[in-house]
């Protein structure tokens, strides 16, 4: 096997690479809470960008820009989630196969979408992710307060976004 092949195909155990202050049980709890959130945030970022490209209607410009703003925020959050996982010895999985397989949401519209459809789709998705994030907080602080703090920060931001999108449905 060539050096290039072995570098790309050899799996490395986290214990051989990343030291952690969490024991295996705590790592499992953190992984079970953060990996689904990582998938949710990647899915939200892709959905928001898809809708950004295809939104139409009288409020096109403002909604187009709002979708760019939330996409940027999702990307920052997902990077923080993945880096938190890595910092405690958990390999994050953000591959497209994982996201497509684990995403609970229906796909975003593949073509033009009226602003009312876009706002409703985003509000629904954000609400679902916020609720799931709130559920993931249960007991997390007992094993890892730093991960709990990260989820609280993300939940606060998601609920702010939910307010902003749902207020446009009036």
Image: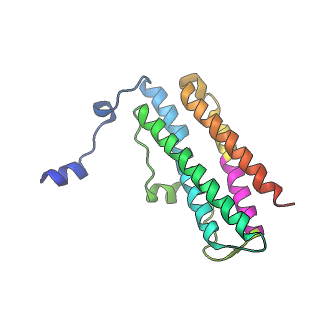
Can residue 40 be seen?
A: no
What's the residue at 51%, 41% (across, down)?
A: 80
Left or right of residue 39: residue 67: right
Left or right of residue 10: residue 118: right
Can residue 71 be seen?
A: yes
Q: Quadrant of the C terminus?
A: bottom right
* In magenta segment, residue 4: no
Q: How is colour applied across the structure in the image?
A: rainbow
Furthest toward the left, the residue is: 1
Q: Position of residue 66 (x, y in %)?
A: 68, 59
Magenta span main SS: helix
Q: Position of residue 23 (x, y in %)?
A: 43, 23
Q: Nearer the viewer, residue 103 or 149?
A: 149
75 above or below 105?
Answer: above
Left or right of residue 164: residue 99: left
Q: Position of residue 11 (x, y in %)?
A: 27, 44
What's the residue at 77%, 52% (across, down)?
A: 164
What's the residue at 44%, 59% (across, down)?
A: 97
**Image quadrant assignment for residue 104:** bottom right
State which region is magenta.
116-129
**Image quadrant assignment for residue 70:** bottom right
Q: Nearer the viewer, residue 73 or 25?
A: 73
Q: Position of residue 37 (x, y in %)?
A: 56, 45
130 above or below 144?
Answer: below
Furthest toward the right, the residue is: 170
């Amino acid at each position: 096997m060539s050096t290039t092949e072995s570098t790309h195909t050899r799996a490395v155990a986290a214990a051989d690479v990343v030291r952690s202050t969490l024991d295996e049980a705590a790592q499992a709890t953190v992984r079970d809470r953060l990996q689904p959130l990582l998938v949710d945030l990647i899915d939200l970022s892709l959905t928001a960008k898809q809708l950004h490209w295809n939104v139409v209607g009288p409020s096109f410009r403002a909604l187009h820009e709002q979708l760019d703003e939330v996409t940027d925020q999702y990307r920052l959050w997902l990077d923080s989630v993945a880096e938190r996982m890595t910092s405690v010895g958990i390999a994050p999985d953000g591959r497209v196969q994982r996201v497509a397989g684990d995403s609970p949401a229906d796909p975003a519209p593949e073509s033009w979408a009226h602003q009312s459809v876009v706002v409703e789709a985003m509000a629904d998705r954000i609400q679902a992710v916020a609720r799931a994030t709130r559920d993931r907080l249960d007991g997390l602080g007992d094993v890892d307060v730093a991960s709990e703090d990260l989820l609280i920060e993300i939940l606060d931001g998601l609920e702010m976004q939910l307010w902003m999108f749902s207020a446009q449905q009036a």
